Amino acid sequence: MTTFLEYLIKGVSVGSLYALIALGYTMVYGILQFINFAHSDVFMLGAFFSWRLATAFHLTEPTPLGATAILLAAMSLCALTGFILERFAYRPLRRAPRLNVLITAIGVSLFIENVGQLPWAFGKNVQQFPPLVADHTFTLGGVNVRLVEVITVGAAVVLMVGLNLLVYRSKIGRAMRAVSIDHNVAGLMGVPVDRIISFTFVVGSALAAAAGLLVGITYGQIKQPADSSWILYGLKAFVAAVIGGIGNVEGAMLGGLLLGLSEQFVAGYVSTVFRDAIAFGMLIVILLVRPNGLLGRRVVEKV
Amino acid sequence: MTTARAAAPTASKVGAPQALARSLLPVAIAVAAALLVDLLAPADSYAEKLLFDIGINVILAVSLNIVNGFTGQFSIGHAGFMAVGAYVSIVVTYYGGYALFGDVIPHESWAGYALYFGSIVAGGIGAALAGYVVGLPSLRLRGDYLAIVTLGFGEIIRVVLQATPDALGVREMRDGIPAPDGTLHKLSRLEWPLHLGGALGFPHPGAYNSLAWTWVAVAITIMVAYRLRESTHGRAFLSVRENEIAAEAVGVNTTRYKVNAFVLAAFFAGVAGSLFAHQIGAGTASRPEEFNFMKSFEAVIMVVLGGMGSISGAAMAAVVLTLMTELLRSVGDYRLVAYALTLILVMILRPQGLFGSEEVWQIARRWWAKRAK
């Protein structure tokens, strides 16, 4: 029972990280109908920006204030990155076939990774992530819980509640939803479509940056920018978005949690080897059984 | 495209033996050229390795072009099928070689080469079967979803390969593997192929391959792709690319043709994998990690740069990019940055790729015609 609970907590913690990244995929997909392949790299940059900032300011001791400052700084930097990506790589292709946009996204992804691993950028070594959160483990009724896991879940919940308020309660959120339904009509109604698309990238990238920082703290070290584990993490988050129904904000959160939990349970009870395969297995099943995801609405294709 | 369409009726007027000769002649010339290159290139040289790499990449790019270029479906899991081909073929030469000859070293005899030929075919068929299994469900999806599913399948194949038990040694095949109680557990021959070397791959891939094998395979791949595009089948592929709904409306079974294209592409990827696994000096070539999604991306980049649907474009992009990789070794990591930038710039400035869907000679002919005026 205790192991079950431990897997559960770990699953929720990993799942909320997936959910944070998945939100970026799902929002961009909802608005532009394309997979932002470079999103996993923005997430990676989030981890590296926070590492760079933390080492630059000699934050070697766990301080709540320092961690929050780093979080906000990394989120702003990644938001800026997201803005630049959209402005200079994707906007010129707004009217191009979707395939071209997808290929460009792959190109952008490769570009960020390979620039990132240059010596003057982040280098090729595994970097020790400064302990911004005390590596503290407490026991609740026989169940070991890491402080990092609690903070991860807490931060994710705060950010997701914030996002929900933004999307469903604010004027700009209404504009985002309008653009995602039909950006031509939204444009005719006076919604500044380009600015809304930029804003979507900014918000998604900021959330990915938060996930990057939390991943860095959770694992204590980060692998080099071009390491395939970053892309794999991003792809799994994308799978989470598809499972929940791509384009759907709640769906991304639900999918993230489902994926995190099933991964931890499979790794715990079956074998760790198949942890990476489970996400794609789930993706294929979902796409065959319910192609629009758990919470997605059915799209009728018109000629 | 217009030139190809105009050429088709004249081709049908030619008698069957002549048509056969016309289709086989280029292969014969290519085979002769391949043998000549094999004789001229000094063994174990840098040039040989380079020619080998180019050959493998040409096969990969031209075969991926059948899916991505002809039918317009975006597959980015090509390395997965290459991995299946590599492993199936190496199982055939390794365990099959033991069953035939009693050891696992390459046999430079007719029997050995027959085994190798069989293993290449088996690798291709294995990959084609994998392509069928993957393609049937996933080709119902479109665009981005298909891309991600193929990528996912490629990764699953790699993960599963990494999880396999170590390859068997000669003694283990003969006597069995030690059980916990100290006795030897004899494995049946059917159990042998489950031992694929795990994360480190096969310890001694048989070095059966040579440039002749590689370039004959290149010639066959190009000819098949070329002849295919001029055939009824190929026209159906192109119609799926141009407008799927219209193709469906005129009676093209789009799903079937997509699966066909996928299976054919997977077959040649498997052939490339077989050649790759048996290359001399490629001691670690069968490591599953070799077939990760970077390998798939490389093939995609070649197809995209060359122009979707252009066979000569894909082949030339494969040659140029492989050479570029070698020439840019001195600038180290900036090479990959340049790669990525090229991809982005080509997409923004010339979205149809360098040659579009035309062949190099079609473009050249038009260019000459314009100049003559």
Image: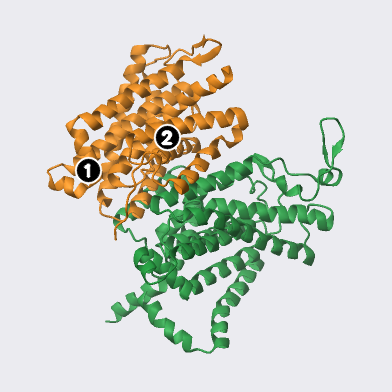
Q: Viewer-proximal residue, B369 or B115?
A: B115
Both on one chain, marks 2 and 1? yes
Task: Judge whether residue B176 can be spotted in this image.
Answer: yes
Q: Viewer-proximal residue, B287 or B121?
A: B121
Task: Judge whether residue B41 can be spotted in this image.
Answer: no
Which chain letter matches label 2? A
Mark 1: few, some, or many residues within 10 Å (few <14, many ≥20)? many
Residue ID at (41%, 57%): B304
Amino acid beneath label 1? Val
Chain letter of the orange region: A
Residue on which disc 1 sits: A179
User: Percent position (x, y) of residue B47?
Assistant: 59, 59
User: Percent position (x, y) of residue B331?
Assistant: 45, 45
Residue ID at (28%, 55%): A96
Q: In the figure, what tint was chain B given?
A: green
User: Percent position (x, y) of residue B103?
Assistant: 82, 52
Amino acid beneath label 2? Gly
Q: Which image quarter is the N terminus of chain A in?
A: top right
Label number found at residue A255: 2
CA gap, disc 2 to disc 1?
23 Å
